[in-house]
Image (cartoon, rainbow, N blue to C red):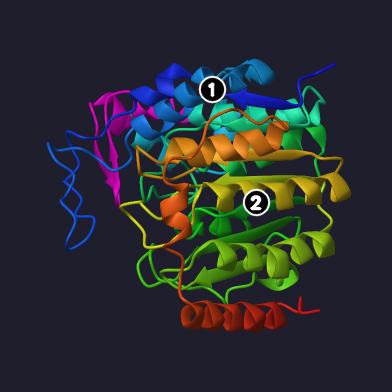
Amino acid sequence: MPSHTAFLFDEMTFWHSASQYALTLPVGGWVQPLAGGGHAESPETKRRLKNLIDVSGLSSHLKIRTAIPAAESDLLRVHPAHYLKRFKSLSDEGGGELDHRAPTGPGSFEIAKLSAGLAVAAVETVLQGEATNAYSLSRPPGHHCLPDKAMGFCFLANIPIAIESAKARFGLGKVAVIDWDVHHGNGTQAVYYNRPDVLTISIHQDRCFPPGYSGTLDQGEGSAVGTNLNIPLLAGSGHESYLEAMESIVIPALQRFEPELIIVACGYDANAVDPLARMLAHSETFRCMTRLVREAAERLCQGRLVFVHEGGYSEAYVPFCGLAVLEELSGQRTEVNDPLLDMLLKQQPGEEQRALQSGLIKEMAKHFNLAS
């Protein structure tokens, strides 16, 4: 009998480095900037997650594997040849700033292909029935990457590459992508904005990144109107607001769309201690959102569900959020306790802000024709 949950990673994805080309990023007026030429998109958040999975014993319950880099044909279904050539040339030269907030280092092109390849393999593993669901520890991330432009630490559109590969190889039909990274999933939106066969939903901090973007009016074009939904949440939104957005908008939208596969662009930067955002989610938020999506996948598409790792920049806290997701996917609970959870439960938004955000979510549900 196949393992319930596959976990895909490769040590080489931790070797992508852009620190020598990256300006130190200020993370807030009262927070010390990252020191020593460091970069927010550090491998340590992912490495520590993998380490926690191992030492907690959860690894023994997962189907752990690696993958080969995404093929050139897979990349070309999403990215034009001239962009890939420019990316490879800069990588071969030792790195530099490819586009906005997208610094590369030596070998970044090959590592990005491997990151995309992990996502491709995760989808294939689920579609071929080798596991019910899968988690791809992809790095560098992909959800900001446009077809012809890198952006926000992202160089290849990992999830669209995986979707288009599966469509070409398996005849995959409708796919839903839920992006709960705290920053807007603008790259995935751009790829599928006029495609009615892919539902894209982004829950993000309002106007955070790309700077000033909210997105509630952007619902797709032509025959795809209604298959792109943006759910901007106010800065300071916490656990209850995320669950309300999931229950009032995301799950009804999935039920209306009836996908054959659900993919989650799984960023952890909505956590309360992340340096690049201002939200108040915690590990139980990610556990509960995962449960809601897993149950929806069981109802709608035989449980076929893939998570692809995106952002999350707190080296101390991302591992606990990721472990909660993987415990929920695999149906296994370890002995690990989140050491910050009690504190974060006491730091949730007050009643006034919670009521304001709830009202805005209800307005969005009505706007999307999802209100009950």
Which circle's residue, 2 or 1, is located before the other in the chain? 1
Q: Tell me the residue at 76%/75% (across/down).
A: 370
For the residue marked with disc 2, what is the amino acid? Answer: Cys
Q: Which quarter of the rendered picture does the C terminus lie within?
A: bottom right
Please rate how many residues cluster around mark 2, counting C-alpha atoms within 10 Å: few if below 14, some from 14 to 19, many from 20. some
Query: Where's residue 282, x and y in %?
Result: 49, 51
Can residue 96 be found in the magenta stretch?
A: yes
Q: Name the residue under label 1.
A: 56
The magenta-colored residue range is: 89-113
Q: Which residue is drawn at 68% across and 82% down?
A: 367
- What residue do we see at 52% from left, 73% from top? 215
Can you say which quadrant of the picture contains the N terminus? top right
Examine the rendered structure and indicate whether residue 56 appears above or below residue 324: above
- Is 263 located above or below residue 130 in the figure? below
Nearest the viewer among 168 and 13 is: 13
- The residue drawn where x is 14% and y is 38% is 37
- Tag 1: amino acid: Ser
Question: Tag count in the figure?
Answer: 2
The residue that disc 2 covers is: 288
Q: In the structure shown, which secondary structural element does the residue marked by tag 1 occupy?
A: loop
Report the side of 211 relative to 204 (left or right).
Answer: left
For residue 5, what is the image quadrant? top right
